[in-house]
Image (spheres, grey):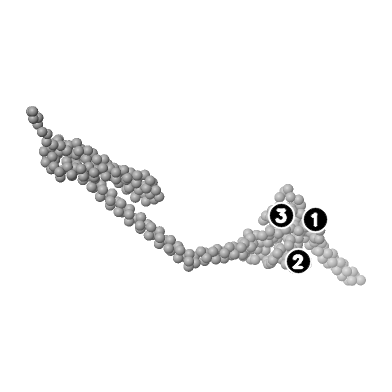
Amino acid sequence: METRANYVAVGAFVLAIIFLGFVAVLWLGRSEYGEEAKRYYIFFNGSVAGLNKGSQVQYNGIPVGRVVDIRVDPNNLEQIQVTVEINTSIVDIKSDARAFLEANILNGIATIQIRGGTQEASDLVAEPGHKYPVIKTGRTELEEVKASLPELLADLKATAHSLNALLDENNRQAVSDTLQNLRTITGALVGPARAVNDVVDNANKAVLELKSLFDHVDRSYTERGGLKDQLSQTIGDADRLAKNLIDTSHQLQQVINENRPGLRNFTQSTMAQVGDVVSELQRFVDGLSRFASEVERNPSRLLMGERHDGYRPQ
């Protein structure tokens, strides 16, 4: 009897230890979140690879819960229903909070990140038809990029088609013709510009030579009689012509050096002065013609002056 009693006592003691062990495990398991733990649903569209039961749930990087169940949504085969348990003593999930699935690139383990939620927003509550409140999901930066890739590729394709249409054979030929025309116009402008430079230089030289010549003639013959007044007038005309030609040449040189749309001002103002110079030149040529005719008619007057008959008594 004593041996049997000892076995019963030992068995009862072992069973009590096992029971206490289960109670301790259950108590420790619940003590992690206590009575303040609350469950939520999260529905993900697409794969949840790397997410397992017991995976960590974080709120802005702080551990606040764990995954307790993962299954296909019985109402929608395209969604994965994830049940999470969150310690509400750490954070209250608000209605404007969003859940994201983030996977570690190195080990492939996924965690659930909850972000957002303002203090003014209401607490998240269960909706009709759901046992637990539903935390809405958001897309990570990588998912945003992946979602925008089709649109980006479509835009690139449209741009490529537009470039191909723009650079077809006809348009390429048109651009080539336009460049050739511009080259021709530039060459045509450079040629006359150089010619005008040459004309201006020659005109300057001629004017200086004419001025020097008439200064010499003026010094040599203005003291004589006869053609003194006419010669002085001619020299004055030549001097004015020289000054006008020099001023005009300077303006022409400035316009050529600028080589820009100032040609309009050249045609409006400088050409008017060129007209004045032409008028002066005409007067100068007329004076020279009269001078040459006078010399041809009476060469002696150039050297001897005009003869005056003396007084003859009656």
Instruction: Give the labeled residue for mark 2.
Output: 76
Out of 305 and 177, give the one closest to the viewer: 305
> Is residue 145 at least partly visible in the picture?
yes
Q: CA distance from mark 3 to mark 1?
A: 22 Å
Q: Answer left or right for 44 relative to 155.
A: right
Q: Answer left or right for 158 relative to 77.
A: left
Out of 303 and 293, give the one closest to the viewer: 293
Q: CA distance from mark 3 to mark 2?
A: 23 Å
Q: Quadrant of the C terminus?
A: top left
Above or below, comparing residue 1 to residue 135 in the picture: below
* Marks 2 and 1 close (CB-CB < 8 Å): no
> Is residue 212 at least partly visible in the picture?
no
Horizontal and vertical percent position of residue 5? 89, 69
Instruction: Give the labeled residue for mark 3.
Output: 97
Q: Which element carries disc 2, helix, strand or loop?
A: loop
Q: Answer left or right for 184 relative to 212.
A: right
Name the residue at the front extreme.
314
The residue at 69%/66% (across/down) is 46
Instruction: Give the labeled residue for mark 1.
Output: 35
Horizontal and vertical percent position of residue 217? 16, 41
* Marks 3 and 2 close (CB-CB < 8 Å): no
